[in-house]
Image: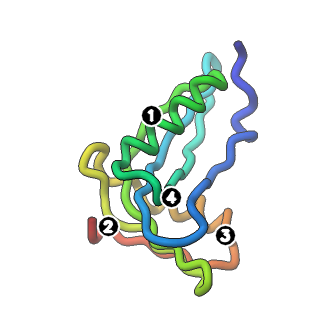
Amino acid sequence: MAAPDLDQIPDVDIDPDGVFKYVLIRVHAAPAGQSKEIVRGYKWAEYHADIFDKVSGEMQQKGYGCECLGGGRISHQSQDKKIHVYGHSVGFGRAQHSISTEKIKARYPDYDVTWSDDGY
């Protein structure tokens, strides 16, 4: 089965409010080797691996390969239009928050989006 166009995969899918874990994932379209990074973060996840396992399973069913580039936490304050990306994942290490933040800024252009390597 040929993998559909990577552009069809949203760059960002995070919960609309709260503090939660997130992962930065690289999705590969074989065999051309094209790839893109996506941000996924949800309150339901007890561990960063829970998010990666769910997303990578969904992507594999669509013909994509995935690798986790790291994780952290997101504080999403929708009423104040603020998102803060910080911390790290014990299992996957720290995501490159600057990449995650740029993708989130593109998805939420009217928000104040910040990041820090501090915190857990």
Few, some or many residues within 10 Å of mark 4 (<14, 14–19, 20+): many
- Residue 14 seen anywhere in this rendered image of the structure: yes
Indicate which disc, 4 or 1, sits on the residue closer to the N terminus.
Answer: 1
Determine whether the residue tagged by mark 4 lies in a helix, strand or loop: helix
Residue 115: quarter of image: bottom left
- What residue appears at the point 67 percent right and 63 percent down from the top-left corner? 107
Direction bottom: furthest residue:
80
Q: Amino acid at mark 1?
A: Glu
Determine whether the residue tagged by mark 3 lies in a helix, strand or loop: loop
Q: Amino acid at mark 4?
A: Ser
Q: Position of residue 64 (x, y in %)?
A: 60, 26
**The N terminus sits in image quarter:** top right
Residue for badge 3: 108
Residue for badge 1: 67
Q: Are marks 1 and 2 in contact (CB under 8 Å)?
A: no
Residue for badge 4: 100
Indicate which disc, 4 or 3, sits on the residue closer to the N terminus.
Answer: 4
